[in-house]
Image (cartoon, rainbow, N blue to C red):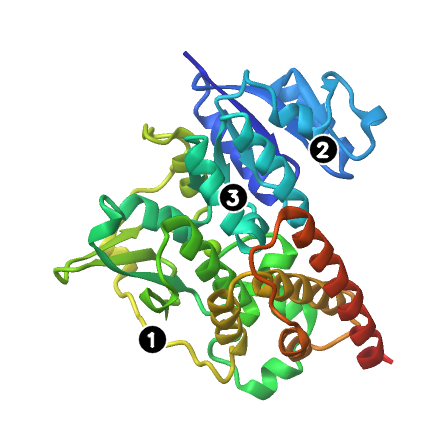
Amino acid sequence: MRKKISILGSTGSIGRQALEVIEGLNDKFEIVALTGGSNTDLLNEQIRKFKPKYAYASDIKAIEGAKPLSLEEICSNKENDIILVAVSGKIGLKPTITTIKNGIDIALANKETLVMAGDIVMPMARKERVSIIPVDSEHCAIHQCIKDISQVEKLIITASGGPFLRKSIDDMKNATVEEALAHPRWHMGKKITVDSATLMNKGLEVIEAHHLFGMDYHKIEVVVHPQSIVHSAIEYVDGSVIAQLGLPSMHIPIQYAITYPERYKGIKSKSFSFSEIARLDFEKPDLKKFKALDLAYSAGQKGGSAPVCLNAANEEAVFAFLNGQIKLFDIVEITENMMKEHRTLKNIGLDDIFAIDNEIRVKARERIKKISL
Ligand code: MG
């Protein structure tokens, strides 16, 4: 029996790599639907190759070779055994919720879902008995290490440190977009690469880990590990530490998430060799240089609407940086100021989350305009 899968965001970085994984597992998967945004040329190419029944794109009329359906319709289609949510941004949230309500398992690569609405999404998934398998390498690592969460003392999330790990604060202040996008270990989309340069990405991952594994923030530790070989680890109450290691390729966690609980050889090309890697280094993150990390911990600890504010302000500022409107350090400064002004609301519903998200984005854009004048 082939596993039936739909990929939301098949033209993005994770989506394209997921299709490479599926191609390498030739007869294991049947693709139900593929969805893209504005890159309909690539989507149509993927449709010709992988022959999904359904597809969605922002210009639905441009789809060739598959029946156009809305994201909602794709996520309520019970032909799916699993849906890979690989869209980036808040547009990932509603389709994820629809998928859960329809009892379909999820391979989750969308950060915003848990950062913005972890308190809603996780209880809903438990109620509907839906598995949420994380795609992000760190959470995928923790997922592989954990047997019994009640025996876990702490989660240890690794961070490569990004392109500015060995640079001074001044270098980082004046960094160009090209420098920020030159990530030493991982090839990813632009937004997440900038987040990796400020370490906001790690902060968002801490919030996700809190929701995914139900772990208190004081039991989640971030350690810088420049080689990106240890993808994360857990410490059990008895002092045993279990880590997951592997070469830094997104193919591995993507394949794990969509084939779980099975494992296959797939497209893995190289065998792991400790002697070739030779050394693994670890150090504490420099919180003066990477203020985003503390900011994310405090947003997570406040809970409610605070992570919504953090995420929205940061995303708007990252876009402004990529457009050349502000400097790299302004991203975290804008986010910090927006957090200071924000009054945290508790017990919020989905509609509140989207309203707060909008409100913060408007305010953030105003602030960006002032700075960039
Ligand atoms: Mg990651």
Mark 3 or 1 closer to N-term? 3
Q: Residues within 10 Å of mark 2 (few under 14, many from 20)?
A: some
Mark 2 or 3 closer to N-term? 2
Residue farthest front in this picture: 347
Q: Is residue 8 visible?
A: yes
Q: Position of residue 230 (x, y in %)?
A: 32, 57
| Amino acid, disc 1 | Glu
Tell me the number on the disc at residue 41: none
Name the element at disc 3. Answer: helix
Quadrant, the C terminus? bottom right
Q: Residues within 10 Å of mark 1 (few under 14, many from 20)?
A: few
Disc 2 to disc 3, C-alpha distance: 31 Å
Q: Residues within 10 Å of mark 3 (few under 14, many from 20)?
A: many
* Of labels 2 and 3, the one closer to you: 3
Quadrant, the N terminus? top left
Q: Vertical placement of 66 versus 148: above or below?
A: above
Tell me the number on the disc at residue 42: 2
Q: Position of residue 315 (x, y in %)?
A: 67, 62
| Amino acid, disc 2 | Leu
Tell whether 232 sits left or right of 290: left
Q: Is residue 248 visible?
A: no
Q: Position of residue 196 (x, y in %)?
A: 54, 64
Tell me the number on the disc at residue 121: 3
| Amino acid, disc 3 | Val
Which of the 4 image quadrants contains residue 95? top right
Q: Position of residue 91 (x, y in %)?
A: 68, 44
Name the element at disc 1. Answer: loop
Tell whether 324 sits left or right of 213: right
Task: Give whichever of 142, 94 is nearer the camera.
Answer: 94
Residue farthest left in this picture: 238
Disc 3 to disc 1, C-alpha distance: 33 Å
Tell whether 272 sits left or right of 45: left
